[in-house]
């Protein structure tokens, strides 16, 4: 079934090195829609990414830094990029050599189109 | 700080007479106690009955600023200015917000706007501080002072902040200056929890150990990385770098790398602060 999120996720997943892209409920970490490569556990990614983003948002706000926008976790074997708001977050899992700059631009564009 | 009894008395009075202006001191006391959600509710209820009261809008703006809702706070102070043109407190508040958002030119323009309408020594001093420090209202200590707070002074510009935190989120070295104060302890304590979540996420996603987190906020772009477990700093420490919004993320990563090197050198006794 195609939804408003489908073209957004398709565009993100076409980026080089992107393994998965998901739209996730910000409050409970449940997947709303996903575009996954084989071997990616969407539910796990959704829950962990939403939890990380929620924590970052709360911490930044408590530290007086205001609202959080784009977030990027870099690890030895991959990257997690997240952007979102109170209700939904957009998540991308990518290889460690993926072009984060391009992914960020696409995610900002996608977040605008979904707002 | 007001004793809890005062809060109760004001709450009772407000319950008896909902149109009373006692919501103002009640909201301010709750704000000072850090009960920001409750303070916001009290201020909003007061504003429902007194929508044209500039003090009420000013009070709500302060609460919103404390909550980190910077743009909403700015809008409230803008409303105060519409009700009372030239309201000094509102302009100072708006300038503070613009400064926090990295829009320093606009912050200075706002302060000068008030200065043009009459001499205010506070405004003059604020402009002086803004210019003197190149944007940071609290001048930093010189890099060679030997003070741990100056650890990253040599690698960061005056409007950039760097901290070395231990596992508990306590500041080991570095500083975080904003609004004329060093708020490193507050910011460090709040941000340190993010690393636990990052550890969990990277572990369960099978993407290896986490190396850095970068996130963009209204007031700053922040980068965190695990600190080198060397010298007196056990494993679990963090290096935090914060720069003004709009800083290219590539530059921020370079600054983070330089701060990590600096921290490593300092922890192993190679100097730094």
Image (spheres, coloured by chain):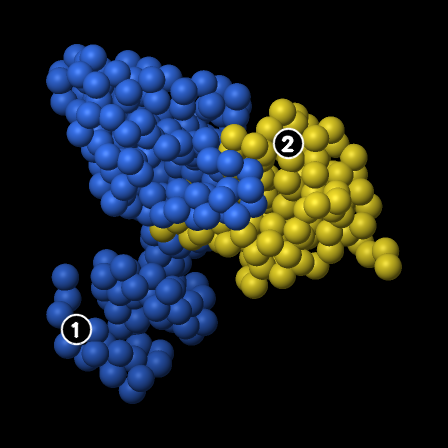
User: Looking at this view, is B182 or B40 the one in front?
Assistant: B182
Q: Position of residue B9 (x, y in %)?
A: 19, 79
* Quadrant that contains the N terminus of chain B: bottom left
- Total number of numbered discs in the rendering: 2
User: Looking at this view, is B32 or B224 the one in front?
Assistant: B224
Q: Position of residue B32 (x, y in %)?
A: 23, 58
Q: Residues within 10 Å of mark 2 (few under 14, many from 20)?
A: many
Query: For residue B100, which numbered disc appears in the image?
Result: none
What's the CA distance linking mark 2 and mark 1? Answer: 54 Å
Q: Residue at x 67, y 32 (%)?
A: A103
Chain identifier, blue in the render: B
* Quadrant that contains the C terminus of chain B: top left
Q: Residue at x 58, y 59 (%)?
A: A29
Q: Residue at x 32, y 30 (%)?
A: B227
Q: Badge 1 sits on which subunit?
A: B
Mark 2 or 1, which is nearer the eye? 2
Looking at the image, can residue B192 be seen?
yes
Q: Badge 2 sits on which subunit?
A: A
Asked whether, in this view, residue B58 is left or right of residue B177, the answer is right
Asked whether, in this view, residue B79 is left or right of residue B170, the answer is right
Q: Which residue is disc 1 drawn over? A: B4
User: On screen, B246 above or below A32?
Assistant: above
Q: Position of residue B204 (x, y in %)?
A: 52, 48
Chain identifier, yellow in the render: A
User: On screen, B231 above or below A22?
Assistant: above
Asked whether, in this view, residue B53 is left or right of residue B209, the answer is left
Q: Which residue is disc 2 drawn over? A: A95
């Amino acid at each position: 079934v195609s939804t408003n999120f489908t073209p957004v996720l398709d565009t993100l997943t076409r980026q080089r090195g992107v393994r998965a892209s998901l739209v996730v409920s910000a409050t409970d970490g449940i997947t709303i829609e996903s575009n996954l490569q084989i071997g990616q556990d969407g539910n796990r990614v959704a829950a962990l990414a939403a939890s990380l983003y929620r924590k970052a948002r709360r911490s930044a706000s408590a530290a007086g830094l205001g609202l959080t926008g784009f977030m990027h976790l870099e690890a030895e074997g991959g990257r997690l990029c997240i952007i979102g708001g109170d209700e939904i977050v957009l998540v991308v899992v990518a290889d460690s050599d993926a072009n984060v700059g391009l992914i960020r631009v696409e995610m900002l564009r996608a977040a605008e189109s979904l707002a | 700080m007001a004793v809890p009894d005062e809060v109760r008395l004001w709450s009772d009075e407000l319950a008896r007479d909902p149109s009373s202006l006692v919501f103002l001191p009640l909201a301010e006391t709750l704000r000072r106690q850090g009960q920001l959600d409750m303070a916001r509710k009290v201020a909003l209820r007061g504003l429902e009955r007194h929508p044209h009261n500039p003090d009420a809008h000013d009070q709500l703006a302060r609460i919103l600023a404390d909550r980190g809702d910077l743009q909403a706070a700015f809008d409230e102070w803008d409303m105060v200015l519409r009700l009372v043109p030239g309201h000094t407190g509102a302009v100072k508040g708006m300038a503070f917000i613009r400064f926090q958002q990295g829009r320093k030119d606009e912050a200075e323009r706002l302060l000068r706007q008030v200065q043009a309408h009459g001499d205010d020594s506070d405004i003059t001093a604020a402009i002086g501080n803004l210019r003197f420090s190149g944007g940071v209202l609290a001048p930093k200590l010189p890099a060679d002072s030997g003070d741990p707070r100056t650890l990253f002074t040599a690698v960061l510009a005056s409007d950039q902040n760097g901290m070395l935190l231990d596992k508990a989120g306590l500041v080991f070295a570095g500083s975080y200056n904003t609004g004329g104060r060093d708020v490193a302890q507050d910011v460090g304590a709040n941000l340190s929890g993010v690393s636990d979540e990052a550890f969990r996420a990277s572990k369960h996603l099978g993407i290896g150990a986490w190396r850095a987190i970068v996130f963009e906020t209204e007031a700053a772009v922040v980068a965190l990385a695990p600190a080198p477990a060397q010298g007196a700093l056990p494993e679990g420490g963090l290096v935090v770098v914060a720069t003004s919004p709009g800083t290219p993320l590539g530059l921020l990563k370079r600054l983070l790398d330089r701060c990590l090197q600096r921290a490593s050198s300092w922890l192993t006794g190679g100097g730094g602060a």
